[in-house]
Image (cartoon, rainbow, N blue to C red):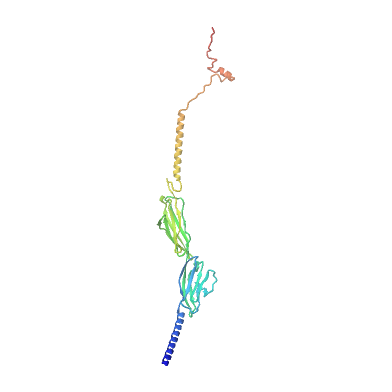
Amino acid sequence: MIVKRHLIFILYSLCSSVFQVAGTKSKAKGSQGQFPITQNVTVVEGGAANMTCRVDYNDNTSLQWSNPAQQTLFFGNKKALRDHRIELVLASSQELIIRISDVSLSDEGQYTCSLFTMPVKTTKAFLTVLGVPGRPEITGFTNPAMEDDVITLTCTTPGSKPAANIRWFRNDKEVQGTKEVNATGKSFAVRSSLQFQVDRRDDGIAYTCSVEHVSLPNPYMTTEVLEVHYPNALGPHGPDHALIGGVVAVVVFITLCLIIVLGRYLARHKGTYLTHEAKGAEDAPDADTAIINAEGNHVHAEEKKEYFI
């Protein structure tokens, strides 16, 4: 019985040793065969991007991050590239996380995480940087515009990536414009034009340019209000000059008519006044003699005689 128990113990020990060796070989084989795990990252220009690389298990093999130019950023917890925007978040045997702050469009590209086994295992992660569009600007407004004029409104927004979308609105109703996209480096300048013939119904209408982009939580908008001048109209922005001119002309005409009527009235009632100078007064040496010599003077008149009885 004792011999039997001894044989069983020896067999158990041998089996345990076999399983332990097999497990060690399997673990070593797994460590050599595994690849780092990464994820693609999308960030808005000016923001911060966290680049994460991890492995399921590791036997103290180092992890490394490299940029699209294959420059080493961090080897384990050791910083290799002098760029103040890049900093270490976490470094362990199973994970390496770095942060890139104030991201620019030039940072976009394919980053590499390497696990330094024999041979080295690498995995790629793509960093996508979204270019934020600039505030839209509307040009082409001529205020006031004249009825029947043909005008072209143009809305432009620079710096978007991918290219932004522009929409036009006439008050609250969408109208179609003509879009043009031009590449400027890694970003795009977008332009949209809206052409129409001015109608008096456009007076006071708000034309809005709306810029939509994946980097914007809400669209950028800019609005211009069109002022239209047309004949015999009193617009909301002030009196019509043609109407004022007509009123002034009527007032002047009425005034002239009144002056003519008044002149004819005075001409009909004008009297003729003659001055009859006394005859014989021209040759008088002085005023007293002129009065005495004047024709019809009381000197030549018949004198009244008085009789006293």
Q: Nearer the viewer, residue 256 or 59?
A: 59
Q: Residue at x 45, y 39 (%)?
A: 251
Count of numbered circles on the image: 0
Query: Residue 33, position in %: x, y?
Result: 45, 79
Query: Residue 123, position in %: x, y?
Result: 46, 75
Q: Nearer the viewer, residue 188 or 224?
A: 224
Q: Residue furthest top?
A: 309
Q: Residue furthest front?
A: 1
Query: Residue 168, position in %: x, y?
Result: 42, 57
Query: Residue 159, position in %: x, y?
Result: 48, 63
Quarter of the N terminus within the rendering: bottom left
Q: Residue at x 45, y 81 (%)?
A: 27
Quarter of the C terminus within the rendering: top right
Q: Does residue 193 appear to the left or right of 71 in the view shown?
A: left
Q: Nearer the viewer, residue 84 or 185?
A: 84
Q: Does residue 77 appear to the left or right of 210 in the view shown?
A: right
Q: In the image, is residue 46 above or below residue 291?
A: below
Q: Nearer the viewer, residue 284 or 191?
A: 191
